[in-house]
């Protein structure tokens, strides 16, 4: 129970109505036929604890989320990313929600850039991006 101005606040009753289509398909603005979200899991390759956790996380994701698209484990910066990382792609809202919530509590010392795929790489990686952990500066000139 939370309090606002000394009064009890209760959850609001939601009006009945049609459920959002966003439960089952990405909203307008996403590139149709491509994955919906990219998760870039960053780690520091010169930090043994960070590198070990990232490698174990990569292996766990491959076993526990076999339906997701997971790319190779890079030990150096790639593209606009300023440190070593690996990428995981989700194909639908259900995968995105399940993976995001799992990663929130299992990412350990890794930081994660999460972005949609709207066809505008610069915007996707900057203004539309969400971060778990620290936000890293990207090489934005590579996205333009």
Image (cartoon, rainbow, N blue to C red):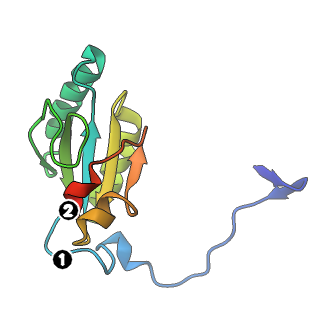
Left or right placement of residue 48 versus residue 8 in this view: left
Disc 1 marks which residue?
32
Seen at 36% across and 58% down, the residue is: 126
Out of 128 and 67, give the one closest to the viewer.
128
Q: In the rendered image of this protein, does residue 25 appear above or below residue 55?
A: below
Q: In the rendered image of this protein, does residue 2 appear above or below residue 48?
A: below
* Figure label count: 2
- Disc 2, SS: loop
Q: In the rendered image of this protein, does residue 18 appear above or below residue 132?
A: below
Question: Which residue of the protein is positioned furthest toward the right in this rendering?
Answer: 6
Circle 1 residues within 10 Å: few <14, some 14–19, many ≥20: some
Residue 81 shows which numbered tag? Answer: none
Disc 2 marks which residue?
91
Q: Which mark sits nearer the N-terminus, 1 or 2?
A: 1
> Looking at the rendering, which quadrant does residue 97 occupy?
bottom left
Residue 52: x and y, percent? 22, 20
Left or right placement of residue 60 versus residue 96 in this view: left
Question: Which residue of the protein is positioned furthest toward the front in this rendering?
Answer: 141
Residue 99: x and y, percent? 30, 48
Out of 20 and 32, give the one closest to the viewer.
32
Left or right placement of residue 20 versus residue 122 in this view: right
Out of 2 and 142, give the one closest to the viewer.
142
Label 1 and label 2: CA atoms lie apart by 10 Å
Seen at 20% across and 75% down, the residue is: 31
């Amino acid at each position: 129970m939370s309090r606002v101005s000394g009064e009890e606040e209760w959850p609001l009753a939601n009006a009945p109505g049609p459920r959002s289509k966003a439960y089952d398909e990405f909203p307008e603005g996403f590139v149709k036929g491509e994955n919906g979200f990219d998760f870039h899991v960053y780690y520091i390759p010169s930090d043994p604890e960070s590198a070990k956790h990232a490698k174990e996380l990569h292996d766990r994701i491959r076993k526990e989320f076999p339906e997701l698209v997971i790319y190779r484990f890079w030990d150096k910066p790639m593209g606009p990313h300023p440190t070593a990382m690996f990428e995981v792609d989700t194909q639908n809202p259900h995968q995105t929600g399940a993976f995001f919530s799992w990663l929130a509590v299992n990412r350990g010392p890794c930081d994660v850039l999460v972005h949609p795929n709207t066809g505008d790489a610069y915007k996707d990686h900057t203004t539309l991006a969400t971060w778990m952990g620290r936000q890293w500066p990207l090489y934005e000139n590579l996205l333009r």
